[in-house]
């Protein structure tokens, strides 16, 4: 492909780090500005940065993801999850940049049976989900030719996530209690990054590339309890002394923000449009656990 500059916002997060680790085609230059260069809480900073670099494509991986804290801090959540994407979309529209915006399973209320597809009605349960849905709406309204990718239950060897938290807690306790009545699709940030790379390159090369809303999660489904059990099962292969894991209900683990009881996402549209078939989540968990424990043993 010809020379192309791709801007990645949120470059210091799980997904941003995985995007930067990928092998990109010759001629692609990634921009992964830190906050001193691009302040996502400032629409003026967003406009000025994008006006200056005029990227061919933008992957907006920046977001406010503290689900519980959002309940008491809605202004910050909506600022980063709604106003920020709107400003990015407006700047992308001015310069003809292709935009991929990352969203979440929390736009759904969890009342559906089975897997959600992209046409299902959204109904967020809390501030975080509502702010992400507002961001989706802004991107669609300002830049109809954009791509929105919803994902769920993201984990990686980096930053804070459920897999790393379980490994840490398992070192500290002989037993852990984990919610067993919420269903979703665990997703490796590395696999999402690879999918986004495929989409971004296609968007840059093909003006007629499919656009709209898509879902990406790893294959299969799980509860948080099942995910925790798998994390510890994999960890024992490396001599990790796993704690006992007890299933509990959502009611037994109250949180400020309500979680959807079902946030399983169908990836059929993405597979059909971009020939992307995610691997099973257990394979992704095994790889991440191995990475985490190897890094721990050498630190």
Image (cartoon, helix red, strand yellow):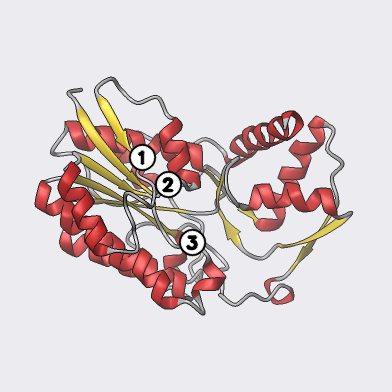
Mark 3 crowd level (few <14, some 14–19, many ≥20, 10 Å Cα): some
Q: Mark 2 and mark 1: span between their CA atoms? A: 9 Å
| Camera-nearest label, 2 or 1 | 1
Query: Disc 1, disc 3: CB below 8 Å?
Result: no
Rendering coords of residue 131 (x, y %)? 38, 70
Rendering coords of residue 162 (x, y %)? 64, 53
Residue 196: give its label: 1
Q: Quadrant of the N terminus?
A: top left
Tell me the residue that label 3 is attached to. 65
| Camera-nearest label, 1 or 3 | 3
Q: Secondary structure at mark 1?
A: helix
Query: Disc 2, disc 3: CB below 8 Å?
Result: no
Query: Disc 2, disc 1: CB below 8 Å?
Result: yes
Mark 2 crowd level (few <14, some 14–19, many ≥20, 10 Å Cα): many
Q: Vertically, is 273 above or below 87?
A: above
The residue at the far top in this view is 26
Residue 165 visible within the image: yes
| Camera-nearest label, 2 or 3 | 3
Which residue is located at x 44 percent, y 69 percent? 129
The residue at the far bottom in this view is 72
Q: Mark 2 and mark 3: span between their CA atoms? A: 18 Å
State which tag comes first along the sequence, 2 or 3: 3
Q: Vertically, is 254 above or below 225?
A: below
Rendering coords of residue 218 (x, y %)? 51, 43
Residue 122 visible within the image: no
Of residue 72 and residue 117, the one placed in the foreground of this image is 72
Tell me the residue that label 2 is attached to. 216
């Amino acid at each position: 492909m010809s020379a192309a500059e791709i801007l990645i916002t949120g470059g210091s997060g799980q997904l941003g780090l995985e995007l930067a680790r990928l092998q990109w085609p010759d001629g692609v230059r990634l921009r992964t500005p830190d906050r001193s260069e691009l302040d996502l809480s400032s629409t003026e900073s967003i406009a000025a940065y994008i006006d200056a670099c005029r990227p061919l494509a933008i992957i907006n991986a920046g977001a406010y993801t503290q689900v519980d804290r959002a309940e008491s801090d809605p202004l910050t959540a909506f600022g980063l999850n709604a106003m920020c994407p709107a400003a990015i979309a407006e700047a992308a529209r001015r310069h003809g940049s292709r935009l991929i915006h990352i969203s979440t399973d929390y736009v759904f209320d969890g009342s559906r049976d089975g897997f959600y597809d992209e046409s299902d009605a959204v109904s967020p349960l809390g501030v975080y989900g509502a702010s992400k849905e507002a961001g989706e709406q802004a991107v669609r309204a300002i830049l109809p030719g954009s791509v929105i990718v919803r994902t769920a239950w993201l984990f990686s060897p980096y930053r804070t996530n459920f897999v790393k938290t379980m490994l840490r807690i398992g070192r500290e306790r002989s037993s852990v209690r984990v919610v067993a009545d919420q269903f979703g699709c665990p997703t490796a940030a590395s696999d999402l990054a690879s999918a986004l790379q495929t989409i971004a390159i296609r968007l840059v090369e093909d003006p007629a590339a499919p656009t709209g809303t898509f879902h990406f999660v790893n294959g299969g489904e799980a509860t948080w309890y099942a995910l925790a059990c798998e994390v510890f099962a994999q960890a024992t292969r490396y001599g990790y002394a796993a704690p006992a894991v007890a299933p509990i209900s959502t009611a037994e683990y109250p949180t400020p923000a309500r979680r959807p009881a079902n946030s399983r996402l169908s990836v059929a549209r993405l597979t059909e449009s971009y020939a992307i078939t995610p691997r099973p989540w257990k394979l992704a968990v095994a790889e991440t656990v191995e990475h985490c424990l190897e890094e721990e043993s050498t630190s």
